[in-house]
Image (cartoon, coloured by chain):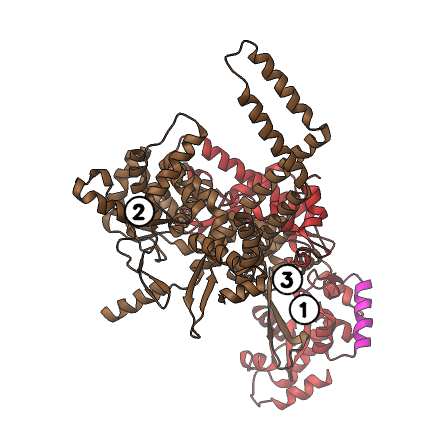
Amino acid sequence: MAEVSKEDSEVVTKIKTEPESAVDLEARILQLCESIPDGINDAIIQNTMPQCDATQRVMAVNRLLSMGKLDLIKIGNKLLYKLKTADAASNQLKGSDHQEKQIYQLIDESKNMGIWMRDIRLKSGLPMSQVQKTLKVLESKKLIKAVNCVNAAKKKVYMLYDVEPDRSLTGGAWYSNQDFESEFVDILNQQCFKFLQQKLAQSREGDLEPTAKRNASYASSTEIWKFICELGISKVKLEVEDIETIMNTLIYDGKVEFTVVPNGDGSQLKIYRAVVSVVPTSGFVRTPCGVCPVFNDCYEDWDISPSNCQYMNDWLSF
Amino acid sequence: MSSSLNHLCSSIISEGFGDIAGRVSQVLLAKGHTSLFELSRLSKERILTVKKCLYTFIHHNLVTFKRSTSGTLEYYIHTDIVLNRILFPKFIFTAKSLFGDTAEFIVEELCFHGNLSLDDIVKNITMKTDAEGNNQNIKKEEIHPIFIKLVSEQFIKRFPSVVGVEDGVPIFSEQKHNLYFVPPMADSEPPEKRQKTEETENLVLWIINYDRFHRYLRDCQIATAFERRIDSNACEIIKIILRISETRTDPNCTSTKGISMIELSPITKKELGISKDILTQYMSLLVEDSFNCVIKLADSGEGTYAIDLPKAMKNLATSHIESIIQEKFGSKAFRIFKVLLLNGNLEQQKIEDCVMIPAKEAKELLYRMVEQQYVSVTEVPKTSDHAPRSTFYLFSVNIDALARKLEENCYMILGNLYSRRDHEGKKSKRLLEKQSKIEAIALQMTNALDPSAPDHAQKLEECQKEIEEMSTVGEKEQIERLSKAYSQLDQAEMQTEELLFILRQCIHYSIPMENDVKSKKKAIEVD
């Protein structure tokens, strides 16, 4: 607290004012902190309360700090006062040292994206061993947790214990415990396609005009989403966006095409329809040569040649 | 020319014209322009034999000749015309389905003999039908109008006539205006002129116009694609548009001339019974379809439409390539391929995100396609030392290059199929000879029987029994297996030919055409 009074003494201005009761001043400072949640510095207090002098301010702030109602944060060379949030975490942090508080603060700021140990070290300026020790302590207190990142298996990020990690970290519905659930994706892929195929078949049956026929084969992503939800194949709650990712895989499979139409409320609606490939299975691959693994080593009168080819023998059933 | 193409061409020639011709063609294919003596020396055949081979080749338009700068006469074989020989069954079938049996005979004759005069065609056809002994004798009067139809539809064209001889080398006329002109029929002329016209008629030789057949087959492919995508009506509309534009469009142009709704609707109404309203809907469907080759040129004439042929062929080739990827590498790899096809250059991480396949599996599939050169990799280094850590590796798909690669593969596959068939034939040569002998004997025996004799039926039965006993059970089985294998080989050949045709067309259109460039230049000059 000695630091505070030193700084304050530098900005002392001599204004003669009526002496105010100390309790009143403290209440007003707290009010000010509440109105500016990002924190206030000494200059702001000075400007809003020009009537009280430096010693009064120092005394009031020191009293608030010791009561635990204010937090002191150092950003650069400046000191900020911030209203202390009266949550459980801060209660649990009671009794922990300055480093723990600092690291906790950093992790808190990272929100649901988490923070990497390296970044904690850089931002806090603490040595590696210290950071590791502190993180372990915080973890054991169940204040923070470590989350493994999906796209980089070895990358661990830290976030507050009760925060739900971001989708980009967990991978959303397609991951369970860092493992990609390809079967789940495959099943959804098949079911979505089945739905669109049925729509296509229905549209072809009816005696409709060509344009109406085509339009009948389209289904919006919301419709498909509803279908999948009603099927109840997913234990995880799926969003419309999840279905759209699945539809993208179908587009890449060449089984579905999509187009965008304006929705009633001015937004854009993605609609999908099943399509048939332009050509039947290519004749190329119906010969053994088309899928032959030693195709490039096959020459007339060589060890591998069309005349003594085992694949050909099997194919021609000799 | 690649070795696989050369191998295929020589196989085609040896199948069509025998082994000696095959050997001579091998030399021609390997050497390019070759003189007669060199041919004889390299193929180890006598000059006279080589001459006979060359005579046959020239007769079938496979070989051309010219005097080289050093004064020797050199021969050159054209692979693309040799390749046409594998399409002959398709040509004959096309003629039959378009113009009936007579046209089939005409095209068949021309396929077998290279070039023929109209008189020879008629003679051959009547001889053939007589020999077959069936009742549908075809007379010259019947052949002539069909022939004229074939010529006016440009399926058959004139063989350039010899206009003179220079340096011992005949010069062919280069007139293009009367390529499709048929001299009037001799009988319809007044008697005094008759002698003269008959003479000229006999002098005019006719050949198959391969390009026209190619165009027809190409049109069929495009139309079928639309049938699969939309329905049969769409297919028919495309066929009509292509048919109308056929006569109007310069064969070398890339896209067809525009056709307006006003022209189109009476034809569709007459042929398909489609009202104009429905036709408009179909046209908009065709334009919007992701096959993406019908273009709306303008709104004039209630909408003018054209077909972008290069795009159509490229899309068809792409679909075939996609199908090949799917069969060769599986549907997951196909998904990766399609992601690359739709998005262009991508990094590995991005591909893995898009395809929703476990990263490890995706990597394996991707690298397998890279290994077999279906996917290409571009290095984009951040530093000049190309250090792998600081280099971006972008994966992409190049359809034009793939089409060429697969074209090459098709040559090889066809070559392999030919080799295999040849091998099978040689392996069971004795058996096949015996079989044909038995058949000949059988025919003789049944012919020798007197159908009016009272015990005819009984004798016939005896005969058949005797013939049956000539070959053992094992032999019969072998023959059956052989014919099955042959038909399987034939089928595979046909399917590969179809792919090869599409790929060749795609490659043909991917090269900017001289005419196009010229016409563009002209347009600029006019402006």
Q: Does the magenta stretch include residue A134?
A: yes
Q: Residue at x 53, y 22 (%)?
A: B447
Chain appearing in red on the rendered image:
A
Q: What element carries label 2?
A: helix
Left or right of A128, for residue B37:
left
Residue that mark 3 sits on: B370
Residue that mark 2 sits on: B202
Identify which residue, A116 or B125, lies in the foreground.
Answer: B125
Question: Residue A34 at what x, y percent from top left?
Answer: 59, 68
Residue that mark 1 sits on: A84
Within 10 Å of the Cα at label 1, are there few (<14), some (14-19), or many (20+) other Cα atoms? Answer: some
Look at the magenta stretch and give its main secondary structure: helix
Which tag is nearer the camera, tag 3 or tag 1?
Answer: 3
Span highlighted in magenta in the image: A127-143
Mark 3 belongs to chain: B
Quadrant in the picture for the N terminus of chain A? bottom right
Question: Residue B321 at what x, y percent from top left?
Answer: 55, 53
Residue B270 vertical position relative to residue B72 in the rendered view, above or below: above
Residue B50 vertical position relative to residue B120 in the rendered view, above or below: below
Question: Residue B238 at what x, y percent from top left?
Answer: 37, 44
